[in-house]
Structure formats: C-alpha cells, structure tokens
Image (tube, rainbow, N blue to C red):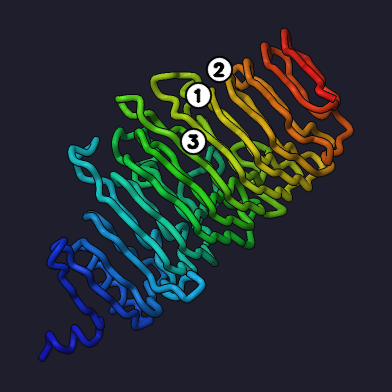
Amino acid sequence: MVRRIIISLFMVMVIFSLASAEAQITIVGQNNPTIDLQGVQRAVDQGGTINLKGTFDFGNEGRVNITKDVKIIGETDNGGKPITKIKGGYWTFHSPLPAKLPPEVPGPKITIQGIHFDGALWVPIHLANSSGATISNNKITNVRPKLMDEPVFGKPGLNRQQGIACLSSYVQPIETRKYIPNAITGNLIIEDNDIDLTNEVPTKTLSQGVLVIWTTGINAQIQRNTVINCARNSIEAIDNFLGKDGSGMVLIKDNKIVNSVEGIPVPTPATPNGIVVGWFLDISGGLDPQRNIKYVVVNNAIRTRGKTSIGIAAFTDGVVIVNNAIFSEGTEAIPLAVTSSDGYIAYNKMEGVSSMPAVRVRPWKPLKGSKNVFVDNDLKQFKTSAADVVFDKDTCDNLFIGPKCKVSDLGSNNSVQMTK
C-alpha cells in the first residue's frame, strides 16, 4: 500500500526498452518542493532517459546532482516550445566533481532538453563534470542573482548570475581554484536555448548567458541561442584547453544577442558585452599552441546597448570571426576588439554611432595584436568621430582589405588596401 501511494504521488512510469535495456522514466510534477525534488533525484540516480511533464517546484535552493549518464527531457508544444517548468532551485541541475581529482574516469554524458527553468538562484544548469553534454531548447527566466561571500575579481559585495555554466571553478575553494584536466570533455552542444537574464542590479551582477571555462579538448557548438538583458558577457568562452592529442574547437554560430543597457564594470570597464572568446584568466594561453583551442565566431546577430559595450572581443590567436552583424548603441562602444594575432576577420557588418572605432586592434600582453587579416568588413553604417579602424601602438603586420574608410595606423608594417 505504501509503495502504491509513493508511486501515485510521483506519478512515475518506468518503461524498459528491450533493444537498449535503458530505463525510461516519466515523472509528472506535483508543484511541491518535497515531492518533486526527491522524485527527480531518484530518477537521475538511476540514469537513462527521464521524461518530465507538468510543473515542478524545487524550492528556494533545491538541487539535483547528476553523476550518471542521463537524458532529462521536458515536454514541448506543437511549436517546440517548452511546456515542462521547473521553478526555483540553486544550481538546479548540477554535475559535481568526483572525489578524486583529476578524474580517473570520464564524467557523465548529459542531455537537458525542453525545460522552462524559472526563478533559479545563480544558475539553473551548472556542469562541473561531463564527458559530453547536450543542452538544448530550454527556456531560462527570472534567474536570481546570488550575492557572493567572497570578492569577485577583488571586489566585495557583488552577485553572480548565469543561464548555462560549464566550468569546474565554482565548486573549488577560491584560494585553490585551478584548471582540472578532463573535468569537462567531449562534445558540448548548447543550442536553441532562450535565455533572459533581466535583473534589478545589473551594475553589481557578473552575468553570463552561456559560460564555458576550463574544459579539455571539447568540440563545442554554441548555436542558435537567444540571450537578452545580460549584464556582462552574453556568451563567454575562455581559458579552454586543447586535448593532449591536439583536439578541440569552439564554434559560436547563429546566436541572437541583445544585452542590457547597464552592466557591471568588472573585471574591465567595457560592459555589457556580446561575445568574448579566448584566454583571460591566464592570457598567455592565447598564444600557446599546446593549449590554445580554436575559436570560430560566425553569423551571430549582436545588439549592444551599454555605453562602453564591445560586440565581439577576441583574446586568442588564430580566431575566425566571419559574417557577424553588430549594432552598437553606446556612445563609447566598440563593435569589434581584437588583441590577438593570426586571426581572420571578414564580412562582418557594423552599425551604430560612437566616439570609438568600429574595429580596434591592440596588444594586451603577452598577446600582440599582429598578423591579422581583415577582409571586406562593412563599416558604412557605423558613424564615429574617431577613425573607423585603429591599429594601436606596437601592433604590426596586419592586413586590412576593404571599402574606403578612415584607418589610424599607430603600429608598424600594417598594410591597408582600399578596394573602392
């Protein structure tokens, strides 16, 4: 009788596929923190495929820890929009690090798909350990900024807020945080998610829509996501390592970004920004062929609204930035900032009115801002009182080919070829 009551409360149906021997569990949310959290955690502990239907309440700080291969699938309407809702939670779905580090076995393979996360604290999806993940077609709203106990980049009293976070740093003590090889590996697919990071204290909230840091040899596709009202970097992928065999690439494609009007000026005054790629925690990685993963940024539509916003910022040698559309509203905004070398930057369209250039190339030690190739970038609709393109002091051997515009060359041996 007791067992029947429990099954009735959870409304769980277990189906075993004879072909795959993989359990498929369907759980119907009861909008009750005690029942919902326990029911989903028990299912996730078994692994396999978990179908979630209805509304789940994880309370103020409920969390489901993922340690086994699992597919967590929500219900969607005829248009593909998530119907399943999970309310609340704190790191609502989280894959913790194993006890022994670095990991001796690959982390779990994780799918999280078709769920509306509403009102999570800090971040609804936080992966610290995974050997492959697909996070797709989720909706994320009303994420509550979390006040940090420790300083953030040396500043006390600041919050953190993210939509999707894949990194191992937050689970480590701040005094000893470091890159953990192979904590996050494999294919990382983050696609078709709808992320709204509106919050009431944007100038005190370090916020990212999608955050990917300290991975190893990942093949990442961050694509077709919509990120709005983010107070720092809408998509940030930094300090990611090549695998031992030289494998790994990060593709950021077809995303739509509209950031907030105000942003947090930490760790730099440029804020809020669109896409940031490369190396920031250890800048030297951006020119180290043994560590520096390949970044490709293509076909993204970015609207920055902050006074000092950057549309795309690159801190990684060999970056490819092609066919992006950047509209900058801020009076001191820069659509494209490149500090690294050997990049290919082509066919991007930049619009707006600013006192700053549309393209700024500058060294940022040890990155040199040299030997980049710029081809046919459209700057006609960008109006500035400065030069359209600036090569700062100590840059060299850059090649700029494109329609006539004003170029300020403060470096050496940079070549500017106007096509018409």
> Which element is circle 1 on?
helix
Q: Provide residue 184's location: percent of width, then percent of height.
A: 33, 41
Quadrant in the picture for the N terminus: bottom left
> Which element is circle 3 on?
strand
**Callout 3 crowding tier (Cα within 10 Å): few <14, some 14–19, many ≥20:** many
Do residues under tags 1 and 2 come within 8 Å of each other at their CB atoms?
yes
Residue on which the image places disc 3: 238
Q: Residue drawn at (60%, 16%), measured in percent from left and top?
A: 368
Between 177 and 322, the residue placed more toward the observer is 322
In the displayed structure, 274 sits above or below 413; it is below
- For the question of whether residue 129 can be seen, the reply is no
> Which element is circle 2 on?
loop
Do residues under tags 2 and 3 come within 8 Å of each other at their CB atoms?
no
Q: Provide residue 115's location: percent of width, then percent of height.
A: 42, 68
Residue on which the image places disc 1: 286
- How far apart, in angstroms, are the residues tagged by discs 1 and 2? 9 Å
The residue most toward the bottom is 1
The mark found on residue 366 in the picture is 2
Q: Which amino acid does label 3 sit on?
A: Ile
Q: What residue type is labelled 2?
A: Pro
Left or right for 60, reference 22 = right
